[in-house]
């Protein structure tokens, strides 16, 4: 039922928002360069890697040695617009259609985080990752990693279709009010270095 719900909503939004996809792609190419899509391996269900798609939200500027500049130096006003409006995440609907992601679930983080989770935190991978989730509508990047993972695991233990509908409705509200998008002192959130009570 959840997969049918995900596919139906994702396909409907993909079709309706296709002009927005095209417009954002053009603006990204003009303001930030190519490629338009940012692709990165992320852990999916049970930690299995998949390729996640987003609109790129930073430039490709490098120093004299060819190394990428720090994120904050590649983050522009247009980057802030994409992140604050969550428009950079629109291509993730492709991942939902492919079955790699769900509309609702714990956010897919970085592959290197897998070995840093405590056994309880690792439960967040017992469901497909989502475009939005319980942690995203209850603080997003403004709360600590520990709190974020507690909310992810709570969702895994309590997921229902009705809860998904509630989270989607709350997501629209949070995006409209642009709440919890960035962590103070960081473009998005600081790196998760591991559970201090684990390992």
Image: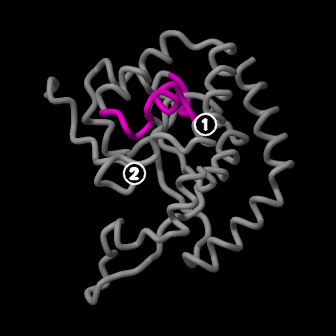
| SS of the residue under disc 1 | loop
Q: Quadrant of residue 68 in the image?
A: bottom left
User: In this rendering, is residue 176 above or below 166?
Assistant: below
Q: Quadrant of residue 165 in the image?
A: top right
Q: Is residue 181 magenta?
A: no
**Which residue is at 54% across, 53% downward?**
84
Neighbour tally class for label 2: few under 14, some 14-19, many 20 plus, Cα within 10 Å: some
Q: Nearer the viewer, mark 2 or mark 1?
A: 2
**Which residue is at 43% across, 68% downward?**
75
Does 193 sit left or right of 137 as displayed?
Answer: left
Marks 2/1 in contact by CB < 8 Å: the verdict is: no
Does 116 sit left or right of 87 as displayed?
Answer: left
* Quadrant containing the C terminus in the rendered view: top left
Q: Quadrant of residue 167 in the image?
A: top right
Q: Position of residue 164 (x, y in %)?
A: 64, 21
Residue found farthest to the front = 177
Q: Position of residue 176 (x, y in %)?
A: 63, 42
Q: Position of residue 57 (x, y in %)?
A: 52, 64
Could you tell me how far apart the alpha carbons at marks 2 and 1 are, in whole angstroms? 21 Å
Region rendered in magenta: 127-144
* Quadrant containing the N terminus in the rendered view: top right
Q: Which residue is mark 1?
A: 101
Q: Which residue is mark 2?
A: 188
| SS of the residue under disc 2 | loop
Q: Nearer the viewer, residue 7 or 178?
A: 178
């Amino acid at each position: 039922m959840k997969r049918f719900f995900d596919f139906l909503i994702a396909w409907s939004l993909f079709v309706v928002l296709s002009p927005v996809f095209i417009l954002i792609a053009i603006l990204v190419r003009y303001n930030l360069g190519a490629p338009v899509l940012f692709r990165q391996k992320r852990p999916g269900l049970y930690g299995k890697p998949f390729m996640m798609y987003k609109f790129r939200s930073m430039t490709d500027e490098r120093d004299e040695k060819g190394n990428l500049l720090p994120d904050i130096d590649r983050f522009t006003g247009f980057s802030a617009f994409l992140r604050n409006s969550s428009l950079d995440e629109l291509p993730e609907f492709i991942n939902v259609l492919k079955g790699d992601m769900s509309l609702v679930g714990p956010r897919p983080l970085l592959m290197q985080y897998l070995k840093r989770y405590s056994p309880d935190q690792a439960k967040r991978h017992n469901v497909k990752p989502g475009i939005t989730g319980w942690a995203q509508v209850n603080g997003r990047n403004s709360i600590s990693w520990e709190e974020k993972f507690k909310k992810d695991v709570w969702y895994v233990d309590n997921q229902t279709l009705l809860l998904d509908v509630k989270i989607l409705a709350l997501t629209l509200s949070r995006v409209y009010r642009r709440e919890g998008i960035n962590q103070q002192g960081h473009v998005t959130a600081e790196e998760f270095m591991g559970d201090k009570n684990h390992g």
